[in-house]
Amino acid sequence: MTEPGNTPSPTSPPEHAPPEGIAHPRAIRSFVRRAGRTTTGQAKAFAEWGPRFVLPFEPKLLDVEAVFGRRAPIILEIGFGMGEATAHIAALMPDHDFLCCEVHEPGVGALLKRIGEQGLTNIRIVQHDAVEVLERMLPEACLAGVHVFFPDPWHKLRHNKRRLIQPPMVARLVSRLQPGGYIHCATDWEPYAQQMLEVLGAQPLLENTAQAFAARPHYRPLTKFENRGLKLGHGVWDLVFHKR
Ligand SMILES: C[S@@+](CC[C@H](N)C(=O)[O-])C[C@H]1O[C@@H](n2cnc3c(N)ncnc32)[C@H](O)[C@@H]1O
């Protein structure tokens, strides 16, 4: 997977003062819009399954039960990439609903393709910045869990501010979690794993389920990307925290 933190980004926030007439600098985003071709199969999946499974971003609170047509625990996934883990987990947990955010269009197409192929009904996708979805669309205490698997590590120090797992974001996530709900993060970048441990550990409403890092929960599959890394001797760190 490409490392956006190492490439110049067309959407990087200005490092200098904003030009006159602009009240606020552009928000710091955790992603860059990567170039990438949507394949014919993904385009077909968009046409066939998009209307049913993709929700528009709207700055108003979502009626989550109406969206899924039932009352079931809802898991938010942030940045599902090509949706490999997402589809696996949704198939494994048919009694849960999955609200999944991704900005990368071919990734959305890829997950729609899996939804169609596997006949999954418990996934809805919002192709938009998860930070805004969280802030504008999700009511307080509506989530049973949050999955953040291999978020962009933003290796360079000057890009660290783009990392998703930071105190304000974690506070927002916690506010949307029900008591007893969980946040599960995984990363293969050790300094980010340490940052996650610090930030999640410092949030008073969260409790670590492990002494430090957790064993990989059974539902999270080893993806192709992760397997490749493991074969090269890279580490992977899971963190699972519960809301008190
Ligand atoms: C390194 S990839 C990991 C993808 C996947 N979770 C996996 O394990 O293979 C991180 C993904 O998060 C997405 N992403 C980053 N920030 C996001 C945000 N704020 N909202 C939605 N998606 C985001 C990126 O587009 C990218 O596809």
Image (cartoon, helix red, strand yellow):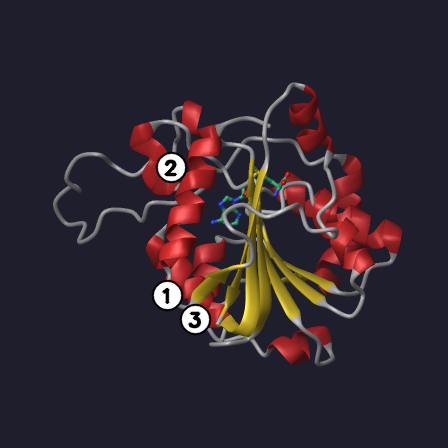
Q: Which residue is labeled 3 in the image?
A: 175
Q: Which of 170 and 190 is in front in this view?
A: 190
Ligand 1: which quarter? top right
In this view, the residue in front, 169 or 194, is 194
Q: In which quarter of the image is residue 64?
A: bottom right
Residue type at tag 2: Thr
Name the element at disc 2: loop
Residue reaching furthest top?
A: 232
Q: Residues within 10 Å of mark 2 (few under 14, many from 20)?
A: few
In percent of the image, x 79 and y 47: which residue is there? 113
Question: Which percent across, then down, holds residue 181?
Answer: 57, 69
- Category of crowding for the residue at label 3, using alpha-carbon neighbours closer than 10 angstroms: few (below 14), some (14–19), many (at least 20): some
Q: Nearer the viewer, mark 1 or mark 2?
A: 1
- The type of residue carrying mark 1 is Pro
Q: Position of residue 79 (x, y in %)?
A: 57, 47
**Residue at image mark 2:** 11
Whether residue 46 appears in this view of the structure is no
Q: Nearer the viewer, mark 3 or mark 2?
A: 3
Q: Which element is circle 1 on?
A: loop
- First of labels 3, 1 by sequence position: 3
Q: Residue at x 66, y 46 (%)?
A: 216
Q: Quadrant of the N terminus?
A: top right
